[in-house]
Image (tube, grey):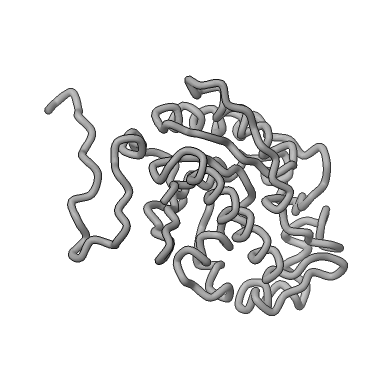
Amino acid sequence: MATVLLVRHGRTTANATGLLAGRTAGVLLDEIGREQAMVTGRRLAVAPLVGVVSSPLERCLQTAQQILGHQAGSLATTVEPDLTECDYGQWQGRTLGDLAQEKLWSVVQAHPSAVTFPGGESLAAMQARSVAAIRRQDAAFEAQHGPGAVWAAVSHGDIIKAILADALGMHLDLFQRINVGPASVSIVRYSTSRPSVYATNTEAGDLSWLGATAPEADAPVGGGAGPQAPVTSGA
């Protein structure tokens, strides 16, 4: 039962201007995005990562580099093509304000499982390949490092939302209820029985418990005791 930290890339120049970048090359983190990635890297420094896997797009690789830069070990980024951004087809490169006028926009909001972007990918296919990639990588890390392994996957907003929807047992039509902000961290543990979602869309908070808490095979009835509370200066 390995643990994956799902990290969205930091804010980009496209995010800041309301542009749907998609798979466009050369979209980089802006100044705020670089700071967000650095903060997330510092936050994950206490997590004993055994690996960092990233979408091949530059904004994710930049974010992954910040995570690696704060790790004590000598890790390298593994590129996973199936964690790349959705292929938005003809929507790519257009502004969100413009796209909101399209008839398909309301379908994306209410019934995403029915959406195939013109000249691009369906959201159902996007979810299928990204979930398969996470489960494949997770199984590999657990096989190599044991059930206590913790690893990070750096990807995109819609990708992480789709992965979380699957882990939560939600229909894809409900995935727009999930928010995933720039450089946020969501936490999922997979087991033979079910995934367990420990956190979504977090931007702060102690993560040292990840290395100290033994994963449980079954869900604790009543909620369990949770991880040991961090020691504070006032304790």
Question: Left or right: where does residue 188 sit relative to residue 172?
Answer: left
- Considering only vertical position in the picture, is 18 above or below 101? above
Taking depth in this image into account, of 102 and 1 the one nearest to the observer is 1
Number of marks in picture: 0
- Considering only vertical position in the picture, is 164 above or below 80? below
Question: Left or right: where does residue 173 sit relative to residue 40?
Answer: right
Q: Where's the C terminus, which quadrant?
A: top left
Residue 19: x and y, percent?
75, 51
- Considering only vertical position in the picture, is 136 above or below 182? below
**Residue sitting at 56 percent across and 21 percent down?**
74
**Residue sitting at 71 percent across and 72 percent down?**
105
Residue 144: x and y, percent?
51, 40
Taking depth in this image into account, of 102 and 70 the one nearest to the observer is 70
Question: Left or right: where does residue 197 sit relative to residue 124?
Answer: left
Quadrant location of residue 197?
A: bottom left
Find the residue positioned furthest to the front: 143
Residue 69: x and y, percent?
56, 22
**Residue sitting at 56 percent across and 32 percent down?**
37
Quadrant location of residue 113?
A: bottom right
